[in-house]
Amino acid sequence: MKGERTVPGPVSILMPVCNEADIIEDVIEEWVQDVFRYLPEGSEFLFDDGASTDGTREILGRMSEKYPFIQVRYNDTKDGFAAAARRLYLAAQCPWVFFTDSDGQYVASEFWKLVPFANEFSVVHGAKIGRQDAFARKAASAVFNYIARVVFDVHYSDINSAFRLVKREVVRELLPTIRCMPTLLNAELLLRAELNNYAIKQVRVMHRRRKFGVSRGLPSNRFLWECVKAYRGLLELKSEFRV
């Protein structure tokens, strides 16, 4: 077990959060106990709160007092998941960056499935096993992933998954170029890493049902339109790299 928990350097754990008061304390405790306490000295745990109004901010404040390594960025404008993700990626200071959701659907201990590949790969991508989401979301994701595999001739099964360990230098190089799929920032980041010939390893990770609420990754009133924009973004990205 000791070898499996050997990370090649300090890690920035990144989590966007918005209105997750019912679950966020449990999520933080799970990640602290199962992951963070084993990370090298100098690691950090960063949150970006997107104008939460349900008590999430107060819980984050209390948890940051309990665990001084937790840093929270508070935003008064609810500008969405992708904007929060971009801010977190830019704020990360450690040589390794780990990004995930704050809703408790990803299992913290699955982080250690990614670690053994960190020395050999620049991006270790966690693809969900048995995605536990509503049918419409799973169907849209399946179509998006199929189109992406055909357009780019890649094998990834869950391109927009929010569970990945990435070298900070890769994030810093690619993040300024992301423009084709602003809502699906993580998907474009993975595809650009592929198109720029970074070494990428896909690892299967568990996914569980939400205990409370519904996914906020894409607003329901804009879901179909955002799907159309995502498909257009795939074609735009392909055109950018066409020789």
Image (cartoon, rainbow, N blue to C red):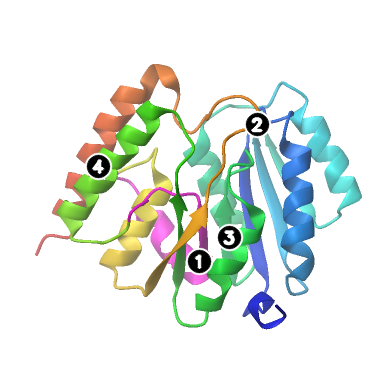
**Badge 1 local density, few (<14 within 10 Å), some, or many (20+)?**
many
Calculate the distance from the C-alpha at mark 4 to the C-alpha at mark 1.
23 Å
| Left or right, 119 with reference to 67 | left
Mark 2 = which residue?
A: 211
Mark 4 = which residue?
A: 233
Compared to residue 119, the image places residue 156 above or below, namely above
Compared to residue 57, the image places residue 127 above or below, namely below
Residue at disc 4, secondary structure: helix
Which stretch did the figure color magenta? 157-180
Residue at disc 1, secondary structure: strand
Mark 3 or 2, closer to the camera: 2
Calculate the distance from the C-alpha at mark 2 to the C-alpha at mark 4.
32 Å
Q: Name the residue: 52% across, 29% down.
A: 216
| Left or right, 189 with reference to 209 | left
Give the numbered dot on residue 20: none
Q: Amino acid at mark 4?
A: Gly
Calculate the distance from the C-alpha at mark 3 to the C-alpha at mark 1.
6 Å
| Chain-order first, disc 1 or disc 2 | 1
| Chain-order first, disc 4 or disc 1 | 1
Q: Position of residue 178 (x, y in %)?
A: 36, 51
Q: Name the residue: 39% across, 37% down.
A: 183
Residue furthest out toward the top: 221
| Chain-order first, disc 3 or disc 4 | 3
Mark 1 = which residue?
A: 166
Mark 3 = which residue?
A: 98
**Badge 4 local density, few (<14 within 10 Å), some, or many (20+)?**
some
Quarter of the figure that contains the C terminus: bottom left
Q: Position of residue 151 (x, y in %)?
A: 16, 53
**Badge 3 local density, few (<14 within 10 Å), some, or many (20+)?**
many
Residue 72 shown in magenta = no
